[in-house]
Image: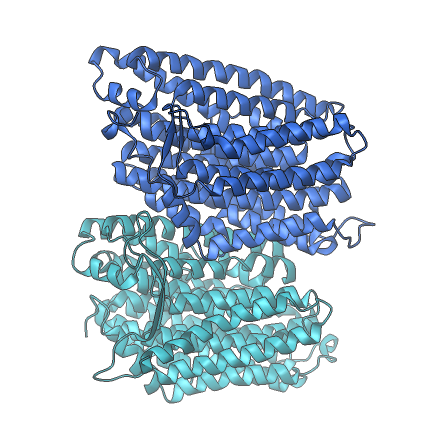
Chain colours: A cyan, B blue
Amino acid sequence: MTFDEAQGYVVLATLAAPLLTMLLLVFVPGSQKMAVRYISLVAGAIMFGLSIYIFTAYQVGDGHNDIQMQLRWTWVENVAFLRQDGITLNLGVDGISATLALLNGIVAFAGTLVSWKLDFRTKDFFILFWMLVAGVYGTFFSLDLFFWFFFYELAVVPLYLLIGVWGSTRKEYGALKLTLMLVGGSALIWIGIFATVHEAGLGTFDMRQLWAAGADGTLDPTFQKTFFPFMVIGCGVLAALWPFHTWSPDGHMSAPTAVSMVHAGVLMKLGAFGVIRLGIQLMPEGAEFWMPTLMALGVTGALYGATAALTQRDFKLISGYSSVSHMGYVLMGLATMNSIGVTGAVLQMFSHGVMTALVFLMIGALYDQAHTRDMKDFGGLAKVMPVWVIFYTMAGLANVGLPGLSGFTAEFHIFVGTFRAYPLAGALAILAAALAAAYMLRMFAIVFFGPLNPRWAGLKEMTPLEKVSGGLLIASMLAMGLYWAPFTDRIGASVTLLPGVTG
Amino acid sequence: MRDYSLFIPEFIAGGLAAAIIAAELFWPSIRRETLAYLTALAAVAWGVASLFYAGNDPESFQGLIQIDNFTTFFRLMGAGIVAVVALLSAQFLSGRTKTASEYYGLLLVAGCAMVYMASARELITAYIALELLSFCLYILVGYLKRDNLSSEASLKYILLGAFSSAIFLYGMSLIYGVTHSTYYDEIASSLASRSADTGQAAVVGFMLILAGVGFKVSAAPFQWWAPDAYEGAPLPVTAFLSTLSKAAGFALIIRLFTSALTPDAVEWRWAVAIVAGVTMTMGNLVAIQQTSMKRLIAYSSIGQVGYMLVVLAAIGWGDQEVGRNASTTLLLHLTGYVLSTLALFAALTAYFNRTGKDTITGMRGMAETQPFLAMVITVSLFSFAGLPFFAGFATKLFMFQASITGDLLWLVGLAVLNSFISLYYYLMVIRQMYLFNPEEGLTRFKVSPVLWATAGVLMLGVIFIGSYPAPAFEAAERATETLFEQGPSLEATAR
């Protein structure tokens, strides 16, 4: 066994951990709520540790492969249309997925901590929660199209119940809308996969063989141009690509705190990750043809989300629209097709992930006590919940792009890339960033300062677990904001190898 | 050669069926549950006996009946379905009828009929097997004779079934007129070399045959009997209808179309593609409006038939390799579909035995009253919708992938969109179970251990096929390997 293969087992363990936790929880009696919580806490910590290991163990530099920690097992082959290596459980990471796996580890662990006080059908909640986390890990690690899609769908399955049962505010509507729109997007991806595997005619779902087929013209340019939109709109639904973003504000408004955190923090990144894997890598010709359109949609999304956030009163809707805006940046970064822009997009995925998870954590901490999220109801909260206000302010400032926090690093890369490729779009993106400052500061002014409404004099500070969880997220934001070399090295090394990406 | 040893498994099943029918005659005090378990044992014996034929060289009985891996595959499937349905019926039937032995005997006979639909290589034999199955089902659907709905369903089913049989026969006679034979291989060779002026008769014949089998598997626009029959039939018989009769129909279709009718595929394949598209769209759209769980399943299974017909279209549009691959994946998908459907009905029967409710709103709050059954139902429905870890995801993906040919991408696209639509009404059921509290007075209850275990084992089967389909997939491939070899190219030596 080579060292790389041995590390492959770490990747496998990271994927297996949530699945085994699910299985274990099935056999724990539902009344043993503390046991369920402790098992989940340990599992979350293990996954967090393994994710950190994968990120740090990923080697950059000469002599290192782009895809490392590979492990492959044959799953089905030589049956019917499947030939040698038809479908393999093929795991591995590149610089992009190593970074995103780290993000998933952080957010899932933070989400576990926050869900400690959840008391209604605790066991069922955590089973579904780990299913969601497993789906996300699997999508990041899979190098086989079948399993990629398998895990992509697996991440969507539990959302309906997670939101429908444990959510708030029009939860049935939000859950149904979200599920149907996401699965509708999956249907497009599904059609794209059928067409691609058929057209390539290799009898395999191995992504690397299919990528090669995309690069060497086995998938001819007309085909790529036809099916690129299927893949990118399909994934784009999950990445809140305007105009397919409408599930996002409603879904986030309804979801329970931990689910909002994982969903906005990590799951939406699966969509953008899909644009890289199934769009840029699988259909480079199609990408070249369609990227200007994606840029236009990304800019529209960024501006639209920011403008819409400016007029909302519900905290979660503000964050929901702000997510649309920030995911717009991600898509813009991808559409630049130059290495700095695409690197920025991946940085932004990470940055937005931790930042938005923190925002939803803060909202949850308030809503659990106040049972309202209407901004106009509040005022002067800095007087009763100072730590909460500081945490929220950090998240807000990262959102706005304050230097020293992760948002700045990411957005700076994206803006530079965009100015190089499409100067006009770059100018509009800066406008969107200014709008972000406006909606954030407006909210801060109304909620944090001013006279304290006596109705809220009894509000308590965050619980210790919430502080730990929030502290973890803030540390991640600071790490990327102050010392981004570990991130940019890993991401940049893989990004420059993407087909069609210029220097 | 008349080798009667080929039929030993059916001798066993048929003989035990006769014994079970006679049992109540000679031993009137026998418990009706005992009959059910005896039937399940008989089905197991039948399945074990048929295992001895697995992997053998194909053998033919007078060119009428072919015992090969394809037949073995359906023997095992039939035995499995009969065993499970017998278990489902045990508690359900005992409170509702005075006599039960005919019911259980007919289950076994219907299973045998399925085997001959799968193995027939001659039109008259296929027709007789089809009729045998239909007659068993007519009686089973109307078995609760004091229940008006059951009688009404049976009457509708008999009338429309007789009508469709007549259509099927008329199609057969036209094909016979064109080809001067009722043997599949001779039909194939005659069709390959038929003169141009027989074109119209052949096309009409194909269409009538398609309509006839379309009735049996409830493809649109011949599906009207299905929802009423499903709704009126006793719950376990509904399970039987939606698994065994569908699987049998497709066994006959695959054998007939791959070995007899492929040479003239140009003449019927467009109709199959249209029927497939209409069936899946109609089934899924109408399912949305249902309030009765049984009717919902009826329309959902019509949608599933639409997906499976895509394979038949692929046999028509593609070359032999595409046809074989697509047939293989169809068998795999059928396996997953049968497992999911039986798991669903095991849970529904257990719930119905306890609460007497079979509407969708009647399932309200099941996650509180019976979390295990709610989980089984959710797994089955997610499997139908094609979500990962459950059989439907892998099998449907393989089936559609194998069915793509240059001309059929649109149909596969339509099928994918349909399975997206289907998720909506499945979620509506899941919503009732998980998002609402149970009605007043309903608290947590236990279900009979037999049904509990049956549902659990079937659910594990659904998850197994979904997470590791290789064994079932390879079995399906072994089952289809003789389909095309016996086809048109070898017609001279086949008999």
In the image, A236 versus B277, the foreground residue is: B277
Residue A18 shown left or right of residue B156 in the figure: left
Q: Is residue A140 above or below residue B464?
A: below
Q: In the displayed image of the protein, which residue is found farthest to the left?
A: A216
Q: In the image, residue A427 lies at what x, y percent?
A: 30, 70
Residue in view at x 59 percent, y 61 percent: A162
- The quadrant of the rendering that contains the C terminus of chain B is top left
Q: Nearer the viewer, residue A167 or A332?
A: A167
Q: Position of residue B146 (x, y in %)?
A: 76, 23
- What is the tally of numbered marks visible in this picture? 0
Vertical arrangement, residue B309 with respect to residue A20, above or below: above
Provide residue A174's location: percent of width, then percent of height: 57, 55
Report x, y in % for residue B168.
44, 17
- Quadrant showing the N terminus of chain B: top left
The answer to which quarter of the image holds residue B408 is top left
| Residue farthest along the bottom direction in this orientation | A482
**Residue B494, located in which quarter of the rendered image?**
top left
> Is residue B417 shown above or below A245?
above
**Which residue is located at x 61 percent, y 40 percent?**
B83
Which of A384/B253 is in front?
B253
